[in-house]
Image (cartoon, helix red, strand yellow):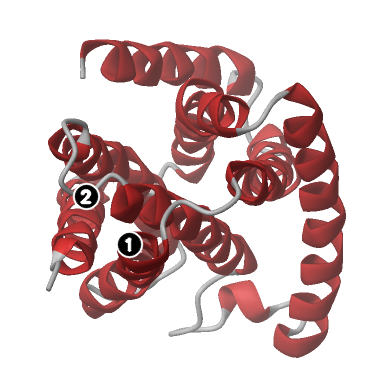
Amino acid sequence: MSFIWVIGYLCTAIGFSIGGYIAWSTKGFQNKTDFVYSVCAGLTLGILSFEIAPEAIELGNWITFIFGFVVGILLFEAAHIILTILLGKTADQRKGLPPKVGILLLLSISFHNLPIGIVLGSTHDTAVEFSMLQAILLHNIPEGIIVFTLLFVAGQKIWSWFIFSLLVAAPVGLGAYFGSTLGNGNPFLWSFSISLAAGTIYMIIVKEVIMEAIKDTSNVLLISTISFGCIGLYFYFI
């Protein structure tokens, strides 16, 4: 029996938790909320540009990417309305409750992880399996930094680091299990799924992160551009 789903789950959880540890270790800088938001915006847009979008286009094509991206934008608007109703307008400031932006990012990254897990499972016992696992581990580090930085700024405690790392890795393990037993299936469907996640993440960053940072600093674009370049170099060298 193949245990690639366990390995994929662990690689995702470890990579995401490493990012969370880095975010926790730099918590002394997190009182500068505008600076943190600007850095996270640049890092996330870099992940979209250098990781998520190329994955979607490689699995499908530009048409599936654009279609999924637009659906992701619409999904964000619907989720934003629902979360506002459920959590209330002041929910972001309530102690112990993650902000809407953190919840939406976690959901979007988790949704993006499902097709990645399926692709991983379908490559089991092939030459690219190790490369896939390495990419999953390393690529989850900056995602963990972004999500946990925003959550720690909002007042989340260290226990959330462990729980959210396990939760966000679950779709990879589930996808890898089905991928190893049923195969890759329809790559255009996974391309659409990844594109949908990309559209949702894009809206989260523009509407919830960048717009908040602009209120407090005029250097948002400069800081975001620098962090965007840094994540580009990170992906180039890994």
| Residue at x-position 42% and y-position 65% | 182
Please rate how many residues cluster around mark 2, counting C-alpha atoms within 10 Å: few if below 14, some from 14 to 19, many from 20: many
Query: Label 1 amino acid?
Result: Ala
Q: Is residue 189 left or right of residue 8?
A: right
Image quadrant assignment for residue 77? bottom right
Q: Secondary structure at mark 2?
A: loop
| Residue at x-position 78% and y-position 58% | 76
Q: Which mark is residue 176?
A: 1
Q: Is residue 84 left or right of residue 170?
A: right
Q: Quadrant where the N terminus lies?
A: bottom left
Q: Kindly tell me whether residue 8 is visible in this rendering.
A: yes
Position above or below: 238 against 78:
above
Q: Is the C-beta separation of discs 1 and 2 under 8 Å?
A: yes
Q: Secondary structure at mark 1?
A: helix
- Horizontal and vertical percent position of residue 53: 58, 29
Position above or below: 203 against 118:
above
Q: CA distance from mark 1 to mark 2?
A: 9 Å
Query: Label 2 amino acid?
Result: His
Which residue position is annotated with label 2? Answer: 124
- Horizontal and vertical percent position of residue 103: 55, 69
Position above or below: 8 against 202:
below
Q: Kindly tell me whether residue 89 is visible in this rendering.
A: no
- Horizontal and vertical percent position of residue 41: 55, 34
Given the current orientation, which residue lies at the most extreme bottom position? 86
- Horizontal and vertical percent position of residue 134: 16, 37
Instruction: Indicate which label's residue lies in the foreground, 1 or 2.
Output: 2
Q: Which mark is residue 11?
A: none
